[in-house]
Image (spheres, rainbow, N blue to C red):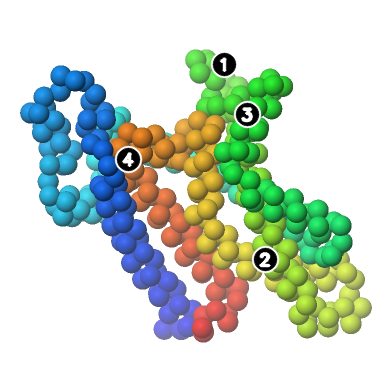
Amino acid sequence: MNPFHKYISRRVIFAVISVIAIISFDFFLFRLMPGNPILLDYRSPALTKTQIETLSKQFGLNLPLWQQYFLFMKNTFEGNFGISIFYHQSVSSIIFPALENSLILLVPATILAIILGILTGKLAAWRRGTSVDSAVTGGSMALYSIPTFWLGGIFILLAIKTKTFPVSGMYTIGEVFSSPVAEFADLLDHLILPLATLTLVLYGQFTIIMRNSLIDVLQEDFINFAKSKGASDSYVLNKHAVPNAELPMISIIAVNLGLTVGGAILTETVFSWPGIGFLIYSAINARDYPVLEAAFVIVAIVIVLANIIADIMYSYLDPRIRYQ
């Protein structure tokens, strides 16, 4: 087996162990939360002890914790997430539409943030020490430090005052669309504020990462060698420096994917965007164990897979990684 295949095999084994550990932590985290989900959902004062026991048996909450754990692990690997305690329907029928809605927000926000971060980070690094560098770095640090809910709140206040964009939801409630084009236009209208919020939150960190990475590359000997051969500044920057500076961004973006998802959860909550983040927030309040467990399992698997893909890309682009 060559070094590349050995490296990938080690990463896959580590990923499988990580997923099992995360799923186990996921189970115990929500089982140890205070509060009885049955009593939270069925708030009727006339609920008898027999009814509580029946409902607990229905959702498997009457079993010893260790039996609940092994049953949970078995069902998870079979793709069976059970029935929601709060919504009273299949968890899969709730989770996957919410995940799709999250991707509608998360994917374009991440792409926009990466593109803008590379462009402005490149500008700041090339003009290091100037007022341009100070402005870009200061603005990026400010955006990176601002709480997501605060930035989203500012956008909501501005939208309400100017009456420009809708401030919550994914579609206009009760609207009957005349065509798919009208429906898509309404979706875009609702998407603008959460997309702008999440893009700006992510943009700050990507700009700083790109700037610092590019500054390191610009000090390398091969950059000076390219300049000594008479290559123009733009050629050296775009053909030699930027491609090498983008390599660390691959792994850093994958590592920071958890923070990216966290930002998406807060953004969805602020704007009531019906994605998996808003679903998690609602399920926490309702102590809806099956929904919480399924949501965290899916998010964890997505993050682990993204890290594996980043490792494969990085080791392919930089062979030195395979031999470490």
At label 1, the amino acid type is Ser
Q: Which residue is mark 4?
A: 291
Q: Within 10 angstroms of label 1, few (less than 14), some, or many (20 or more) residues?
A: few
Tell me the distance, in whole angstroms, between the alpha carbons under discs 4 and 3: 29 Å
Q: Residue 153: image x %, image y %?
A: 61, 33
Residue 47 relative to residue 13: left or right: left
Tell me the distance, in whole angstroms, between the alpha carbons under discs 4 and 1: 34 Å
Residue 89 visible (yes or no): no
Vertical comparison of 28 with 41: above or below = below
Q: Within 10 angstroms of label 3, few (less than 14), some, or many (20 or more) residues?
A: many
Q: Reading the chain from its start, which is encountered first: label 2 or label 1?
A: 1
Tell me the distance, in whole angstroms, between the alpha carbons under discs 3 and 2: 34 Å
Q: Reading the chain from its start, which is encountered first: label 3 or label 2?
A: 3
Q: Reading the chain from its start, which is encountered first: label 2 or label 4?
A: 2
At label 3, the amino acid type is Ile
Q: Which residue is mark 3?
A: 156
At label 2, the amino acid type is Glu
Q: Which residue is mark 2?
A: 246
